[in-house]
Image (cartoon, rainbow, N blue to C red):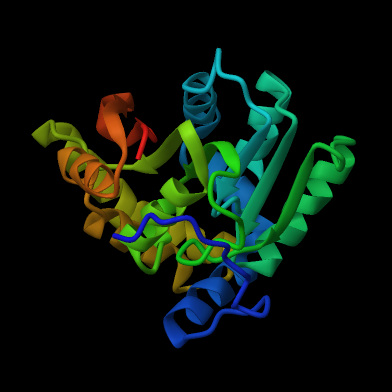
Amino acid sequence: MDLSVTTRKNISGNKPQNKERAAIAQMFNKIAWRYDFLNHFFSFHIDKIWRRKAVNELCGRQLDKVLDVATGTADLALAIQKRLHPGHITGVDISEGMLTVGRQKIEKTGLEQQISLEYGDSAALPFNDLTFDAATVAFGVRNFEHLEKGLGEMFRVLKTGGKVVILEFSIPQNRIFRSIFHFYFFRILPFVGRLVSKDAHAYNYLPDSVQSFPHGAEFKSKMESCGFSGVTVRPLTFGIASIYAGIKQNT
């Protein structure tokens, strides 16, 4: 992997460039208006606790600039700002629909000067090397079109000593709880999601993407192969979700 100092431009022209990325962006555009409600509903609002735990991973660090990748409707960016008050948070996403909802939430909280949202593809982040003190992702890394490229891009734009924190769904290891999780994720969630969001595909995509995501030790290994050191894995709520954290050491 080439980690040499470069300057990346937004080559996307503010629009996804291939069919797969465009399809994912369109899917999230369609459900953006119900995304927050369904997130909280399906997780019984535990997702808010998970985000707080992810924010805690950054406590005690000097944070001038923070990057939130796949920011969606900016829930994690808002949680970071309210708890840690960094100099500035930049959120990027490929879904303009999600960004629109996020900007509305930021405006309502009066944080337009502290948080900015813009189009950004995880595989080609439009930022210079060594720009950010921390990079975060909440429930978005499994949607990266190119996982290693996305991790490599976060590594590239982090300053030396910077920290990455990733919150993502994972598969419970306990056999009984895993069975309950599978029934809920593959039967209940898609059915209710279709009724509320009016999108038949989106809430089938969610469990499928979780099922195929390399969670736990496998994802830890991928982070390490992309350059991150001291990578930790912290399972949450019987392993339904996990927090992954790593540091960019001297290169």
Above or below for 49 versus 140: above
Q: Nearer the viewer, residue 7 or 69?
A: 7
The image position of residue 174, as x and y in percent, is 13, 31
The image position of residue 93, as x and y in percent, is 60, 60
Q: Nearer the viewer, residue 39 or 129?
A: 129
Q: Is residue 82 left or right of residue 53?
A: right
Considering the image in quadrants, where does the C terminus appear?
top left
Furthest toward the left, the residue is 175
The image position of residue 112, as x and y in percent, is 86, 43
Q: How many marks?
A: 0
- The residue shown at (56%, 79%) is 16
- The residue shown at (31%, 47%) is 184
The image position of residue 31, as x and y in percent, is 61, 65
- The residue shown at (76%, 60%) is 100
Q: Is residue 218 visible?
A: yes
Above or below for 188 versus 162: below
Q: Is residue 73 visible?
A: no
Above or below for 58 versus 145: above
Q: Is residue 179 left or right of residue 27?
A: left
Q: Nearer the viewer, residue 151 or 175?
A: 151
Furthest toward the top, the residue is 60
Considering the image in quadrants, where does the N terminus appear?
bottom left
Q: Nearer the viewer, residue 128 or 84?
A: 128
Above or below for 208 versus 240: below
Q: Is residue 104 left or right of residue 22?
A: right
Residue 70: image quadrant is bottom right
